[in-house]
Image: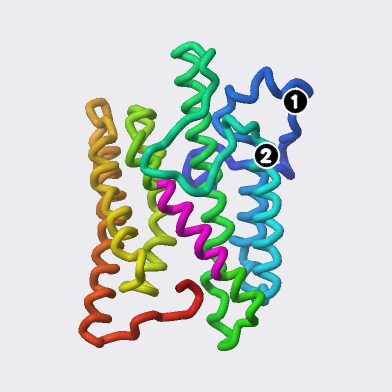
Amino acid sequence: MSLRTDKPPLLNSDHCDMSDAEDQTLWYHSLPRDTNLARIKENASNILCSPRAFKYTEGELLAHVRQLDDELEEWRLSISASYRPRLSISSDLVFGLPASLTERDRMKERTYFINLQLDYLFTIINIHTLVRKCGDFEENLPDDLHSVVESSADLSIEASRSIFRILNQIVELWEEDALWIVSHYAPMAAMPLFMNILIHPLGSSADNDLHILSSISKITRKIPSERLPMEEIEHIQEISEFVMELVRLNHSAAWKVKRGEREHDLDIIHT
């Protein structure tokens, strides 16, 4: 892949030393990403996105999801309260940063906090979205496993909402880099919302979630584009068009239900 793309290879923890430095405080916030969270993301990809993941039984898959979720929560609680990520982000994002910081330091800390929050939400989606396949192969999912599936669906959906709220509020923070932030997070965040609306097009949260998905147009318009080359501007447009196509498909599903052309709900995973 590296030879084909002319980009450097991506190394996992088997091929590089990701252990923490003795005095982590000297460099901790100068890193663009948290290395401990990166290890959890790597584990999630290896366990849930590899070819062997499609051979797991439903019980094995949910056990892996539980384990990864426990690791993620343990990591979250290890973060100091001022920077600790949270699942649900309101429409008014509040930062609990120390008042003693200079304006320049506050901007750096604010950027670090937001990147940490987005990475955390991205990891939740990465861990919990795959449980949607549960129930496809067995008609009667046991009650204890059904509750885990429902909980995972709720977590991935709320994480998706939070990512869109963050992007909608502060996408200008990254200036020209906002393009790559949006292109990385928005498509991933769109899928759990799209899937849930497609399954339950007339559900109680469908209208609100459609509004959240539709905010991609507003988000992409906020990206500073004065100094971007044309191919990157076109990439912004492609992202917006992709998410808006998901919105169109969701609207189509709702109208099919209203016309009696399909069932109200397609499964029992999320109610």
Report the residue marked by disc 1.
21
Residue found at x 33% / y 41%: 168
Question: Is residue 139 placed above or below 75 in the rendered structure?
Answer: below
Q: Which residue is mark 2?
A: 36
Task: Classify mark 2: residues with Cα within 10 Å, few (<14), some (14-19) or many (20+).
Answer: some
| Colour style of the rendered protein structure | rainbow
Based on the displayed image, in which of its 4 quarters is residue 167 positioned? top left
Q: Which amino acid is tagged 1?
A: Ala
User: Could you tell me which residue is drawn at 56 percent across and 88 percent down?
Assistant: 139
Q: Specify whether 167 is left or right of 69.
A: left
Location of residue 2 in the rendering, given as x and y in whole percent from the top left corner = 54, 44
Measured from the top left, where is residue 125 in percent x and y?
52, 55
Q: Which corner quadrant holds the C terminus? A: bottom left
**219 within the magenta span:** no
| Element under disc 1 | loop
Q: Main secondary structure of the magenta part?
A: helix
- Label 1 neighbour load within 10 Å: few <14, some 14-19, many 20+: few
Q: Nearer the viewer, residue 151 or 12?
A: 151
Q: For mark 2, give the secondary structure.
A: helix
Does the magenta segment cover residue 160? yes
Q: Is residue 253 toward the left or the right of residue 193 in the image? A: left
Q: Position of residue 1 (x, y in %)?
A: 54, 49
- Between 194 and 7, the one lying in front of the other is 194
Q: Residue at x 31, y 55 (%)?
A: 213
Q: Which residues are magenta?
A: 150-163
Q: CA distance from mark 2 to mark 1?
A: 12 Å
Q: Could you tell me which residue is drawn at 56 percent across and 80 percent down?
A: 135
Q: Is residue 74 above or below residue 151?
A: above
The count of marks equals 2
Residue 201: image location, x then y, percent: 32, 72
Q: Which residue type does callout 2 highlight?
A: Asn
Q: Is residue 218 above or below residue 212?
A: above
